[in-house]
Amino acid sequence: MTENGIVFYYLCNMNIEEKEKYKSDFKIELNKFADKLEKYVSTENGDWSVKGFIDVYKNIYTISSDTKIVSKILEIHIFSQILQFADSIDYKIILAEKQNWYPDLTFVHKKNEEVKFALDIKTTFRRNEKTAGFTLGSHGSYFKERDKDKNIQFPYNQYTGHYCLGVIYTRTDLSDDISETEIYQVQELLEDYESPNKKVGEREVTTVKNLKSITSVIKDFDFFAAEKWKIASDKQGSGNTANIGSIFDIKDLKNENGIFSQLGEEWFDEYWINYGSATMVKDGNPQKIKTLKDFMEFKGRTDLWEKIVAKSSNKKMK
């Protein structure tokens, strides 16, 4: 039997209580870790402690609020903390070998390497005080063919659990235009004999008294940990790409109260494996199934409709 086959056999035959114990312990520690991260990345007034990039001439270049840029820098900012966290709970980390592979991080138990957890770092800005949203990974090849390793670090069925470390923030600079970024020199960083620069190339340099004088592009962080299936919606997350979308209510995200949360992970798996390919006849016309309610009707389980969690935590689908 191949190495992958051995691992799969082990996971299939792992005592259910043992598997759940690993998952419970990991989630408890991940929750504790998420709770600590806000203070690590923030100043005392809630601003992001990262102000920009500095060069050897002590010029500070501010950051665009473009979500891709912010996300990558946030990941770099907290990465050392993630390494320390993994070591503290007796796990090692394997990074995704390629940029578009799932997951961002694989946690492997040091004493039992068959125990693996997938962790994606998901960052987004608040649309308003109550809503934000993420994409939660593909429902394509590796999600459907769970014993294959295409675009995934290990086959999907080798993971004991799939988790997200969610980061929600407020944008203070609403412009994504990189040309709107500024260059600063900070008096407190200069030696007595150094004079502030006036220009870098053709660009003006602004002199400020201290680092705190530079406005952070994001602020007011919310960090939380969640199992992926518990915060999933039944809608795709972005355009025509095969990505699973999350729910949008921030309170529900933090409480893991997604549309599948009262039904179970099996329904999440089966729905997204069949999303857009299973077909039902409705009102005399064939149509691709793209809602959970239709899928459950297709499966003959309308008796479970009341367990479909709707948009807010205190509502069920009617």
Image (cartoon, rainbow, N blue to C red):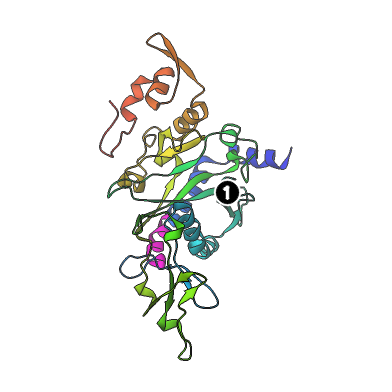
The residue lying at 65 percent from left, 36 percent from top is 148
- Along the line of sight, which residue is nearer the eye, 212 or 78? 212
Q: Position of residue 20 (x, y in %)?
A: 48, 44
Q: Is residue 200 left or right of residue 92?
A: left
Q: Position of residue 144 (x, y in %)?
A: 57, 31
Which residue is situated farthest in the front direction here? 202
Kind of residue at disc 1: Lys
Q: How many marks?
A: 1
Q: Is residue 81 left or right of residue 32?
A: right
The residue lying at 57 percent from left, 44 percent from top is 159
Q: Is residue 1 left or right of residue 29?
A: right
Placement of 295 over or under 284, stated as above or below:
below
Magenta region, residue range: 31-41
Magenta region includes residue 67? no
The residue lying at 55 percent from left, 77 percent from top is 56
Placement of 267 over or under 56, stated as above or below:
above
Q: Residues within 10 Å of mark 1 (few under 14, many from 20)?
A: many
Q: Position of residue 218 (x, y in %)?
A: 37, 60
Q: Considering the image in quadrants, where does the C terminus appear?
A: top left
Magenta region includes residue 34? yes
Q: Position of residue 313 (x, y in %)?
A: 28, 40
* Residue named by callout 1: 116
**Residue 285 falls in which quadrant of the image?**
top left
Placement of 52 over or under 178, stated as above or below:
below
Q: Considering the image in quadrants, where does the N terminus appear?
A: top right
Helix, strand or loop under label 1 = strand
Which residue is situated farthest in the right direction here? 1
